[in-house]
Image (cartoon, rainbow, N blue to C red):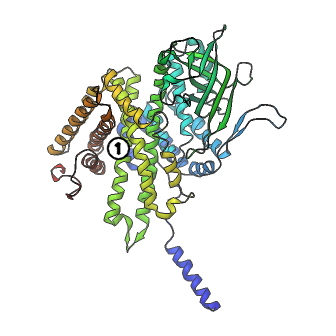
Amino acid sequence: MSAADQTQMSALAQASAAAHPVPDRGHVNNYTSDPELQQLLRLYLPADLYAHLQPYFERMGELAGGVVDDWALQADRNPPTLQVRSRSGRDEQRIHKHPAYVEMEKIAFQEFGLAAISHREDMLGWPGRLPAIVKYALTYLFVQSEFGLCCPLSMTDSLTRTLKKYGDEALVRKYLPTLLAMDFDSAVQGSMFMTEQAAGSDIANTLTVAAAQEDGSWRLYGEKWFCSNPDAGFGMVLARVQGGPPGMKGISLFLLPRTLDDGSANHYRIVRLKDKLGTRSMASGEIRMEGAVAYLVGEQGRGFVQIADMVNNSRLSNGMRSAGMMRRAVAEAEFIARERWAFGKQLQDLPLMQVQLDKLRVPAEQARTMVLQTAAALTRSDAGEPGAYALLRILTPLIKFRACRDARKVTGDAMEVRGGCGYIEEWADPRLVRDAHLGSIWEGTSNIVALDVRRAIRREGSLPVLQQHLLGLLADTGGITAAYRQALADALAGAARLAERAVAEDGEALVRQAATALYNCTTAIAMTWEAGRTGSAERLRLAQLALAHRVLPRDPLGGGAAVPASWLA
């Protein structure tokens, strides 16, 4: 080939590359690019509060969709490392975090105070306590780029909540200010050390021992097997009181400070850091306590009951994180489908792609609605509203169970829309897929959380409260056909009957199906209510798809329309 021919071919290749680049969504404001979220926040927040917070939502959307996304990629590629000794040979343990991770910490903990926002009266320029939806909405925007850091955020928030609820006055007075400090250099983070090799989800098998001291403190001996944020300033630890009764009645809850009053390190070691599939930016490790000083939180023998409040708070956060990751995955897939052409058409105009995108959108929007509904229930429960706690107790495990499982599939299927590039670590898809799988493991596996739905029905009487709540939303919804309204009511009744069977002594095998049915009915009804209030035809369409495809039985050989014609106005 002559030099002239080579030059011509090179020019053609460059022109082809310029005309058909791989679509790259790049930096985008996660808030302003999401009109559906804006509509929902206007619905769930008082008008004056929404107007006040809009600049904060926009700021977080800009950061999360911009520099935080860049930092998240860097931190994922450069996981933390454990230093066990100083260069002079002293035992000085320290976890080294990548500077990109530290910058993200400053935004989350200091600029927006996401770990303190539920516990202070002066956050984001608003007088008084902000409702829980604000914290979850801001974190929902943040987690679309960075998942790992949201674990320390949630645990710090949850540890603070548990300490305030169960700790004695002196303990709260001593340690709460450092947990709520807004200065990054002086504030501390929280963690939760529960998991042991022999125990896992069976807390009654906890082997860590607590020995009482004359000064009222305790000494802890034992190992914890999976401790995220292991160098946190404080950890909530479950341990068995020395000489106490066997089983769950012998388990108590303790606050473990990283640093003692004299400034020295407490008597526990980080044995090693975990080499994890996902959440690579955030350290997780193994802890060995060798007479570590700790303080009893709440009553002896009620450790599981007390830490359950912390776990439930973390489970709601876990569901929110899965919802946020699904939103990012869907947004990326929609962008690719809009910008990429094949066979002379945009991908989004191809019938199979339209079906595939809807299969991503439906669970993502279900999870988003569930976050808002559960956060609203949390605010009402904390305010002491009758029935709100029972509602919260069932909504929380429902979102943890179903949204976290849905995120695994949604992120994987969204990767496929991008094609081969979706399998490359330069893009967000692999990180989303890896991180999504952790959601259904930590804070209780799917089976454990499904059983908690059953426990909420049995102990809290949550099922009729949930039914009453959903029927109230349905009654408050206009603009839908009688056939669709009846279909929603019938589906809810059927899900409740299945749940009642699952609660029966021989019904344990049904708890997963019952939890899924309740989740899908809850979200279909709540999304329909939201559509009626916001006027969103798209939200109503997705609600109908949720009911038709995720609740009602369909003949796989029957074909037919996406939803029955009688449902359409």
Which residue shows up at 25% across the image and 30% down it? 501
The answer to whether residue 332 of the structure is visible from this angle is yes
Q: Which residue is pictured at 20% across the width and 44% down the height?
A: 479
The image shows residue 118 at horizontal and vertical percentages of 49, 28
Which image quadrant is residue 87 in?
Answer: top right
- Residue at the spot x=63%, y=19% of the render? 220
User: In x, y percent, where is residue 335?
Assistant: 44, 60
The residue tagged with tag 1: helix, strand or loop?
helix
Q: Nearer the viewer, residue 358 or 252?
A: 252
Q: Measured from the top left, where is residue 246 in percent x and y?
A: 50, 15
Viewport quadrant of the N terminus:
bottom right
Query: In the image shown, does 417 or 71 lie closer to the viewer?
Result: 417
Which residue is situated farthest in the top direction here?
A: 214
Q: Is residue 270 above or below residue 67?
A: above
Position above or below: 183 against 547: above
Q: Pointer 1: residues within 10 angstroms few (<14), some, or many (20+)?
A: many
- Taking the spot 36% from the left edge, 38% from the top edge, the residue there is 370
Q: Position of residue 35 (x, y in %)?
A: 39, 49
Residue 566 left/right relative to 421 = left
Visible in this render: residue 120?
A: no
Give the residue pinned by disc 1: 366
Compare residues 197 and 193 and report the one nearer the observer.
Answer: 197
